[in-house]
Amino acid sequence: MVDVVVQRPARRVVVTAVAGAVLGLLAFAVDAVDGTAEQIMIAVVSSGLAWGSAALLAGYAAPDRRSAVTGATALLASATLVYYFLILAISRRWSGGTLADGSSAHWYGLRSLAIMTTAWLLASMIAGPSLGLLGRMTRIARLPAAALAAGTACGLLSGEGWLQVALAPPWRLWTVAGPDAVFARGALATELVQVLVPLAVLAWLASAQRLWRAWYLMLIAMAITATLSALLWHLVRATANQLG
């Protein structure tokens, strides 16, 4: 009996890690796609929205607090490791560059790859427990706390999308014409996915857990965390550009 109890949590972590590996593989596959399809597929399988939603659902389905934390964290960490390992070993897009003096830039590429892997692993250690616990709270907590958790999760997941909306408003993208029109339409579709999907997740959680009576708490939590999340994504992108 003790062996069964010990093995079940370990099995859940393994299953979640495998799911994360699949997510990392899908994200890597998107790198081979071009054009508008790439923009949309990035939002669906290779973005903070996609990975964060997976971590949230891992926490929502977890049977206990510990499993919610370890499962969501294992999912994000394995997705990160698989994605960057595939870049290292298969696409090798870090190689082939040259410096101004004509020498190889391989070591600089490897350094950048190592920094990005470490940075996203650290982000996984923070986002995993947070989203895992929010998912579990949405399912087991009493109404006010569950509504706040659902709204907070939606805000976190939609932050990247709202940042994109702020940087490139949809009405401007819609009016773009000429050779840039196709790219603009792809960016518009991406923004819609990144904003509407978190709202759909929130609506599903609210319906599944009967949280509509506290709709105002969900909206307040969503508005606050979406703003903070957008600011955080802006900081992450600026830092990544400097490190890259």
Image (cartoon, helix red, strand yellow):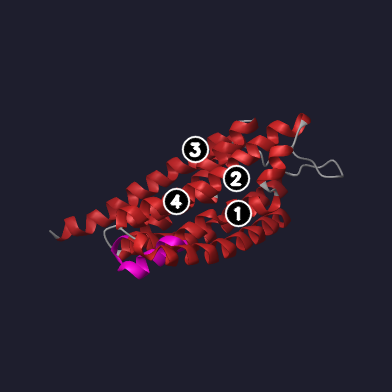
Q: Residue at x 57, y 40 (%)?
A: 42
Q: Position of residue 135 (x, y in %)?
A: 37, 59
Assess disc 3: are there few (<14), some (14-19) or many (≥20) residues with their C-alpha within 10 Å of its C-alpha.
some
Q: Residue at x 49, y 44 (%)?
A: 82
Q: Position of residue 75 (x, y in %)?
A: 42, 51
Q: Residue at x 58, y 65 (%)?
A: 228
- Spatial separation of the CA atoms under disc 4 and disc 1: 16 Å
Looking at the rendered structure, the kind of residue marked 3 is Leu
Give the magenta-colored segment's residue range: 139-152
Q: Secondary structure at mark 2?
A: helix
Assess disc 4: are there few (<14), some (14-19) or many (≥20) residues with their C-alpha within 10 Å of its C-alpha.
many
Looking at the rendered structure, the kind of residue marked 4 is Ser
The label shown at residue 53 is: 4
- Spatial separation of the CA atoms under disc 3 and disc 1: 24 Å
Q: Secondary structure at mark 3?
A: helix
Looking at the rendered structure, the kind of residue marked 1 is Trp
Magenta stretch holds residue 140: yes
- Position above or below: 76 against 228: above
Magenta stretch holds residue 244: no
Q: Quadrant of residue 93?
A: top right
Residue picked out by circle 2: 191
Sooner in the amino-acid sequence: mark 4 or mark 2: 4
Assess disc 1: are there few (<14), some (14-19) or many (≥20) residues with their C-alpha within 10 Å of its C-alpha.
many
Looking at the rendered structure, the kind of residue marked 2 is Glu
- Spatial separation of the CA atoms under disc 4 and disc 3: 15 Å
Q: Secondary structure at mark 1?
A: helix
The label shown at residue 26 is: 3
Residue picked out by circle 1: 162
Relative to 146, 160 lies left or right = right
Q: Does the image show residue 32?
A: no
